[in-house]
Image: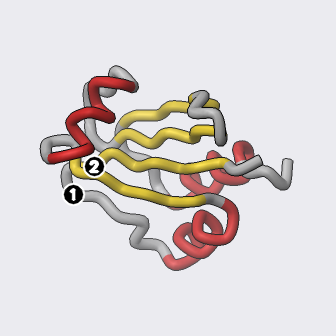
Amino acid sequence: MVLTAIAIIAVYAFSNAEVGKFYNQNFINVAFDGEKGYGIMLMQKYNLRSYPSLLFIDENGKVIKKTAGYHNSSQLLSLADKYSLKN
């Protein structure tokens, strides 16, 4: 099973090296600007209303977890740990 973490962003990035490393090792990560191009379609498809939004989606396109708003590094790691395939 492939699990994808999608971040819908205005301006947002995993700035903490530990967070980035964990997400890169455990997910296929993509980021889109919710106000441009493909990001607009994703905002509509997943009924997203705020930035940043973070989606964990399985290989069938099913949303496993959807979050919105700011998450600090420990919260991002907790989410990643809970929804990674190692669990």
Q: Which mark is residue 77?
A: none
Mark 1 neighbour density, 10 Å: few (under 14) some (14–19) many (20 or more): few
Mark 2 and mark 1: Cα distance apart in space: 5 Å
Q: Which picture quadrant has residue 86?
A: bottom right
Residue appearing at x 79%, y 51% in the figure: 85
The image shows residue 5 at horizontal and vertical percentages of 53, 50
Q: Which mark is residue 11?
A: 1
Residue at the bottom extreme? 17
Viewer-proximal residue among 6 and 21: 6
Viewer-proximal residue among 61 and 32: 61
The image shows residue 78 at horizontal and vertical percentages of 66, 50
Q: Which picture quadrant has residue 23?
A: bottom right
Residue type at numbered disc 2 = Ile
The image shows residue 69 at horizontal and vertical percentages of 36, 38
Disc 1 element: loop
Q: Reply above or below: 38 against 46.
A: below
Residue for badge 2: 9
Residue appearing at x 27%, y 40% in the figure: 51
Residue type at numbered disc 1 = Val
Residue at the front extreme? 60
Colour option used: secondary structure
Mark 2 neighbour density, 10 Å: few (under 14) some (14–19) many (20 or more): some
Q: Mark 2 and 1 residues: CB-CB less than 8 Å, in contact?
A: yes
Viewer-proximal residue among 86 and 17: 86
Q: Is residue 63 left or right of residue 11?
A: right
